[in-house]
Amino acid sequence: MADPVRVWLVERTYSDDEQNLIILTYATPDGKRDLRKERALTSFGDHRETQVSLAADPDNLGAVEDPEIREQYAREATAMADEHDPDDTL
């Protein structure tokens, strides 16, 4: 396995297709690569902490093709990295 790549939380959205599913998007600080994770909520009061960053396997990262989204992810990832330690949670 290649060395892990640090990715930062850039977006949390609710799935349009599935109820009780949150999609977490993490991205590299340059916004060029991303990782999506899905989390099923087990109940209405499910308030699990979310990691602000992950050490991701590079083989699991996708390419961000859209230049506007890439810029957005770069801004968000940089802001998270500036404001939080890698092991912080939200």
Image (cartoon, grey):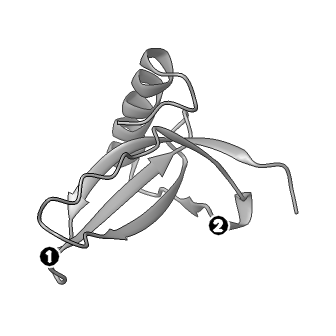
Q: What residue is shown at x 51% (from left), y 54% (from top)? A: 34
Q: Amino acid at mark 2?
A: Asn
Q: What residue is shown at x 47% (from left), y 21% (from top)? A: 84
Q: Quadrant of residue 22?
A: bottom left
Give whichever of 16, 85 is nearer the camera: 85
Q: Residue furthest top?
A: 82
Q: Residues within 10 Å of mark 2 (few under 14, many from 20)?
A: few
Q: Is residue 50 left or right of residue 85?
A: left
Q: How far apart in space, not on screen, are marks 1 and 2 (Cα)?
A: 23 Å
**Residue tagged 1:** 16
Give the secondary structure at mark 1.
Answer: loop
Q: What residue is shown at x 40% (from left), y 40% (from top)? A: 73
Q: Are marks 1 and 2 in contact (CB under 8 Å)?
A: no
Give whichever of 47, 15 is nearer the camera: 47
Residue 60, disc: 2
Give whichever of 41, 5 is nearer the camera: 41
- Residue 64 pos. (x, y %): 48, 56
Q: Residue furthest right?
A: 1
Q: Earlier in the sequence, mark 1 or mark 2?
A: 1
Q: What residue is shown at x 33% (from left), y 52% (from top)? A: 48
- Residue 68 pos. (x, y %): 32, 44
Q: Is residue 6 left or right of residue 66?
A: right
Give the secondary structure at mark 2.
Answer: helix
Q: Amino acid at mark 1?
A: Asp
